[in-house]
Image (cartoon, rainbow, N blue to C red):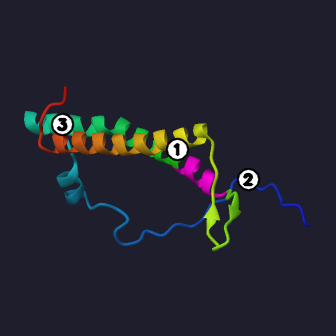
């Protein structure tokens, strides 16, 4: 193996492709300025921004649930006489899976409710 020369950082050539920049007129049209929004739209924008925590929480909990369930199903205890996989679990493992799945379902329901509230422009308490 030949050692690499230390020539400093590398750079790759870039091309200006059609559509890679926003024309000035379009950029000005799409520029959102809170001062130009009505109070209704400001409230709706704030409500949608508040959803970020709920989305991230749901993402993390669904990843944990996936790990728990996939770990369980990756270790079958045996195969029965008909060729079906048999899984054994402890009460603790079953309770963790049940909690995780129910928690993801509850978080998804809550996020849906909050999204519909934000979409309708209602203020959340």
Q: Is residue 58 visible?
A: no
Residue furthest out toward the front: 81
Residue 124 in the image: above or below residue 103: above
User: Is residue 47 or residue 101 the one in the foreground?
Assistant: 101
Q: Nearer the viewer, mark 2 or mark 3?
A: 3
The residues bearing labels 1 and 3 have C-alpha atoms spaced at a distance of 44 Å
Residue under the point 48% across and 70% down: 15
Q: Which residue is mark 3?
A: 34
Residue 16 in the image: above or below residue 77: below
Residue 45 image label: none
Q: Is residue 89 magenta?
A: no
The residues bearing labels 2 and 1 have C-alpha atoms spaced at a distance of 51 Å
User: Is residue 44 or residue 35 the one in the foreground?
Assistant: 44
What is the x, y in percent for residue 43?
A: 15, 34
Q: Is residue 69 magenta?
A: yes
Q: Are marks 2 and 3 in contact (CB under 8 Å)?
A: no
Mark sitting earlier along the chain (2/1): 2
The residues bearing labels 2 and 3 have C-alpha atoms spaced at a distance of 44 Å
Residue 91 in the image: above or below residue 12: above
Position of residue 90 in the picture relative to residue 111 (left or right): right
Start and end of the magenta stretch?
Answer: 66-74
Residue 97 image label: 1
Report the magenta stretch's main SS.
helix
Q: Nearer the viewer, mark 2 or mark 1?
A: 1
What is the x, y in percent for residue 48?
A: 24, 40
Q: Which residue is mark 2?
A: 8
Would you identify the image quadrant in which residue 47 lies? top left
Rendered-image quadrant of the C terminus: top left
Mark 1 residue crowding within 10 angstroms, few (<14) / some (14–19) / many (20+): some
Residue furthest out toward the right: 1
Residue under the point 63% across and 65% down: 85
């Amino acid at each position: 193996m030949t050692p690499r020369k230390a020539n400093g950082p590398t750079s790759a050539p870039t091309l200006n492709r059609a559509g890679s920049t926003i024309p000035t007129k379009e950029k000005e049209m799409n520029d959102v300025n809170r001062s130009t929004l009505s109070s209704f739209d400001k409230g709706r924008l704030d409500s949608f921004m508040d959803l970020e925590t709920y989305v991230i929480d749901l993402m993390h909990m669904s990843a944990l649930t996936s790990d728990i369930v996939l770990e369980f199903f990756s270790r079958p205890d045996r195969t029965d006489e008909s060729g079906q996989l048999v899984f054994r679990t402890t009460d603790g493992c079953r309770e963790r899976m049940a909690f995780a799945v129910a928690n993801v379902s509850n978080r998804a329901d809550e996020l849906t409710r909050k999204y519909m509230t934000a979409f309708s422009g209602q203020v959340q308490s």
